[in-house]
Image (cartoon, grey):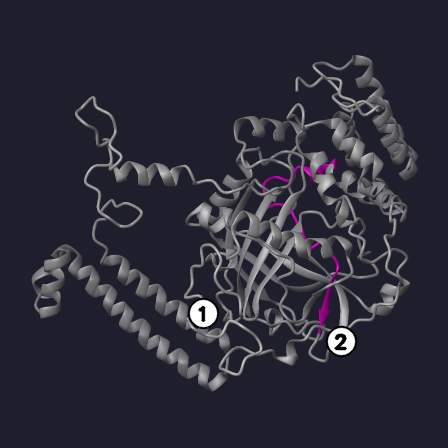
Amino acid sequence: MQRSCASSKYWKITAKMYGSKACCINGIVLALIIISFIIFIVFMVVVSWTHEERFLRNAVEFFFNFVNLYNASYKRPDVLTTGAGIPIGDKLNLQTAGPRGPLLVQDVVFTDEMAHFDRERIPERVVHAKGAGAFGYFEVTHDITHYCKAKVFEYVGKTTPLAVRFSTVAGESGSADTVRDPRGFAVKFYTDEGNWDLTGNNTPIFFIRDALLFPSFIHSQKRNPQTHLKDPDMVWDFWSLRPESLHQVSFLFSDRGLPDGFRHMNGYGSHTFKLINSQGNPVYCKFHYKTEQGIKNLTVEEADRLAATDPDYAIRDLYNAIANGNFPSWTFYIQVMTFEQAEKYPWNPFDLTKVWSHKDYPLIPVGRIVLNKNPVNYFTEVEQMAFDPSNMPPGIEPSPDKMLQGRLFSYPDTHRHRLGANYLQLPVNCPYRARVANYQRDGPMCMTDNQGGAPNYYPNSFSAPDCQPCFLESKFRISPDVGRYNSLDEDNVTQVRTFFTKVLNDAERERLCQNMAGHLKGAQLFIQKRMVQHLMAVHQEYGSRVQALLDKYNAEGKKNSIHVYTQGGSSVVPSKI
């Protein structure tokens, strides 16, 4: 067999360079590539007849998979090198003056290794630090082009590659992913018109409705600046002072506050968006993705056990499921509200602390999200993954949602801090299915040809990208007076009451009250009292159950508890500075 493979001049050269054992395998792979090229030509003919874009994409992917396989078959054993590619002869021993002598400055193998090691870590995400990622595709199953002109929804059957990152919100990168916390559910669609980042959670609502409160809200969920401990006083003081948080807090302390991994939970775009069709007609929209694995939650006992024994449980569950071919999937829906309906809606339709009634605005099926590929390298494909809600292709636009408007600035700003000005050139973030053409140049870690010698100013008289009026944002009218409007009292209880009385059954209500009281007991009594008053306003039973449990816990006394803050504003624990 080896003799016949090496009969031609080509195979003789190949056998000499790489070893005759690989020769036959290479011949088989080469034959497969020739076959795939023939299939590619057939697909091209089909494309020319049918104008079906998906045939072309499938053919290109099929062909290049074989090319990659062929290239991989020719790889020689790797030679250990420095970062500059210089071969290394010894990576186990320092270069010293004698066996007991000092290290030499010229030991570049050591300095190259240590200098890079000293700079391995990048800033951790301020929120959503602990997370898992995966890749897959979105497939359109229902036509919504009468609502939206975005090419991602162009026709039934169209597929778009995507990346997803799941996360907890408040914990650090090394924290447990089974704790009671909202879960981030961010989706990056690599569309023909640039990336579309849908940065959502596993809840359709949030704790606040005004973006100005976001830094303070996050600070309250993080560590006390004096003790460096999670502080129930901070958490419940903020929530009880901002009663718009009642809806999300109730959701959080219900069973769904402890999802069983990332596969068994729903996702939501949460914010209100605007869809524009090809005629320029707008509607408001909310995005939902319902798990096809079914909702599963952990008990408090299971979550606590896993936090101690397997703090990476959710990451492991997702990775193993995909590795075993059990690809998780979600059904993608939208809710639609016309501008006229928005004017008559009993609540602010852009309020992130409220939902739209499914009865009045039913879910409209759109497609499916399927995750079928694990990351090859966590750092490059997950840790460096950056989502930006301002990345919206033509046909999808922001609404007046105050939280969304704030995130349009905050998210890309934090990515520029964490990853650098050219973070969109990183492979996982780059819009590889669209051609980037602009007048942005230079910056740290520019990884492209920097758009060559093309003009870097606009307008200019030479060959350069130009604006296309067909991609103009839709016009909208604004008439109110500019001001800072207080939204604290915009009915914070009606939807929470519906959640408590109609969404939850009695057993679920009991667990909600137990979970909430079990955490609220760590706060000072005046904070407990204020929070219970809000719960009473929602429903008498809600407040009474929580108060009864608090009375029991408070009678038992608090152990190992120091309240750093007092109502006078001073610290109980004095500073030594």
Q: Image point 50% across, 46% down: which residue? A: 383
Q: CA distance from mark 2 to mark 1?
A: 36 Å
Single out the residue that lies furthest toward the bottom. Answer: 49
Quick check: is 257 in the magenta stretch?
Answer: yes
- The dot on residue 451 is 1
**Mark 2 near mark 1, Cβ–Cβ under 8 Å?**
no
Report if residue 245 is visible in the image.
Answer: yes
- Give coordinates of residue 543: x percent, y percent: 88, 31
- Give the answer, above or below, for where 478 lies relative to 206: below
Name which residue type carries label 1. Gln
- Give coordinates of residue 363: x percent, y percent: 74, 61
Q: Image point 91% across, 34% down: which residue? A: 536
Among the two numbered marks 2 and 1 on one chain, the one whose residue lies closer to the N terminus: 2
Q: Image point 61% across, 52% down: which residue? A: 413
Tell me if mark 2 has few (under 14), some (14-19) or many (20+) residues whose alpha carbon lies within 10 angstroms of its own.
some
Tell me if mark 1 has few (under 14), some (14-19) or many (20+) residues whose alpha carbon lies within 10 angstroms of its own.
some
- Give the answer, above or below, for where 82 lies relative to 303: below
SS label for mark 1: loop
Pick whichever, 468 or 259, lies toward us. Answer: 468
Identify the residue under disc 2: 281
Q: Quadrant of residue 149?
A: bottom right
- The dot on residue 105 is none
- Residue bounds of the magenta highlight: 253-276
SS label for mark 2: loop
**Would residue 123 appear left or right of 299 to someone viewing this image?**
left
Quick check: is 163 in the magenta stretch?
Answer: no
Report if residue 324 is visible in the image.
Answer: no
- Give the answer, above or below, for where 237 lies relative to 435: above
Name which residue type carries label 2. Asn
